[in-house]
Amino acid sequence: MNKLMISVSGIRGIVGDGLTPEVVTNYAAAFGTFTGQGRVVIGRDSRVSGEMVMAAALAGLEAVGCDVIDVGICPTPTIQLAVENLKAVGGIAVTASHNPIQWNALKLIAKQGLFLDEREGKKVQEIAGSKDFEFATWDKVGHRTTYLRAVADHINAILDLKYINTHALRKRKFKVAVDCVNGAGSTLIPELLDKLGCQIVPLNCEPTGLFPRIPEPLPENLVELCRLVKKEEVDVGFAVDPDADRLAIVSERGIPLGEEYTLALAVKFLLGKRRGTVVVNASTTKAIEDVAAEYGSTVERTKVGEIHVAKKMQQIKATIGGEGNGGVILPDIHLGRDAPVAIALTLQHLLEWGESLSELYLSLPQYVMAKRKIELANADLDAMMAEVEKRYSQENCDFTDGIKILWRDSWVHLRKSNTEPVIRIIAEARSKEKADQICHKFIEELTEIAR
Ligand code: MG
């Protein structure tokens, strides 16, 4: 993997080995040139390198004349919401999301609180490449102020949601185990749970940035949480990634439901309140279509990536949407993946359901996903994809993002990676064996085509 990755969503790299203060300052100055002088919100996850990266980004922004509102350590959705609430011209989240501890990144946010789209991101890339910025003179240099209420604003916005009955939740007193991986959710999430009347069993809720498990909230990384859920006999377990935009749920039996089901649960709950269109990316579980059909609603699919989903949701005024990796987007609050929002919706859902979370999960359509990738260093990936397209042209195909072939209750999705010589293969079926089988078949077929 490259040590510094530049994309339309910002820059990402290994600290001290690609991601240096010079690179960060340059990129922040480019972003400040793009937004124009005005107020830019900046916040970060709890990573140990966060302070240094943030200082470099601050210097870049102030040097081109932006005034900076520093919201401190908080989740990415909290920063997105602050950009909107504080009427800023843009924002920067200093976070490498689910990446390991040695990584950090700048995620760039446009003035409505959405991430930059492709056109906007390319513009910033161009400015950064050409270093075409004007540094301000002493009297025009920007200044930094702090805003310490971003977390409280976010919590209040969640408590104000019309779907959330805080009074009833407080009476119910759910017992909840929560694993924040010592990330940016470590303050906000326990506080939110407390406001919702929960009895909290915390795990890794110190925002030290020292991740005690692999930060991505995949089932295999949640062993400690699952053990705690069983030992403490809680109603539900929650786990997030370091910047708390993705949520994973563990049942009262200590079994991770898989991140796809975070969104499936939220969609079921919301459509039960209000019919409408759901927007998800091309790789998200088919359970979403099945649930939507139950409630007389439809689903629109987009390319993979939060911004694609968010823009589509904005355009068609969707009821709910998100990505199958635990990223729930509820437009009633804002158009960004938001784990705290997903937590509140899940608890309210569980309250109204009245039975256990395991039973609620089993009431959903059951699918299993398999994910593989195939590395093809010297192959022409575009030609390979074209060959697959030709071979399956008689099938039901979707070309929203790469190639997706759909059968009655299974599908496969092939996507070229933007950063590596890799084709990703995702399959979903009614059983694990079937999903594995589909992946295996396509790995063999791609290998054969590459020859
Ligand atoms: Mg994240």
Image (cartoon, grey):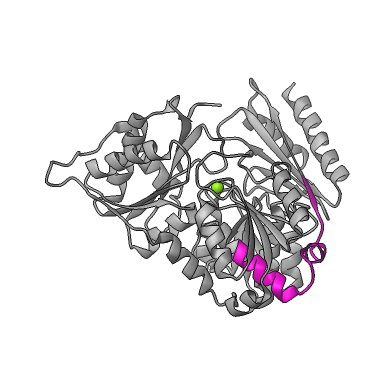
Between 61 and 319, the one nearer to me in the picture: 61
429 left or right of 249 in image: right
* Range of residues picked out in magenta: 343-369
What number of labels is visible? 0
Classify the position of the C terminus by image quarter: top right
Question: Does residue 368 belong to the magenta stretch?
Answer: yes
Classify the position of the N terminus by image quarter: top right
Between 137 and 313, the one nearer to me in the picture: 137
Residue 52 against residue 350 in the figure, above or below: above
| Occupied quadrant, residue 100 | top right
Q: Position of residue 145 (x, y in %)?
A: 27, 53
Q: Position of residue 411 (x, y in %)?
A: 78, 48
305 left or right of 384 in image: left
Q: Position of residue 54 (x, y in %)?
A: 37, 41
Question: Does residue 9 belong to the magenta stretch?
Answer: no
Residue at 60%, 59% (x, y): give it. 328
Q: Would residue 112 be visible to someone looking at this image?
A: no
The chief SS type of the magenta part is: helix
| Occupied quadrant, residue 123 | top left
| Occupied quadrant, residue 235 | bottom right
Q: Would residue 172 be visible to someone looking at this image?
A: yes
293 left or right of 94 in image: right
Residue at 47%, 32% (x, y): give it. 13
Q: Position of residue 2 (x, y in %)?
A: 52, 26
Residue 202 against residue 223 in the figure, above or below: below
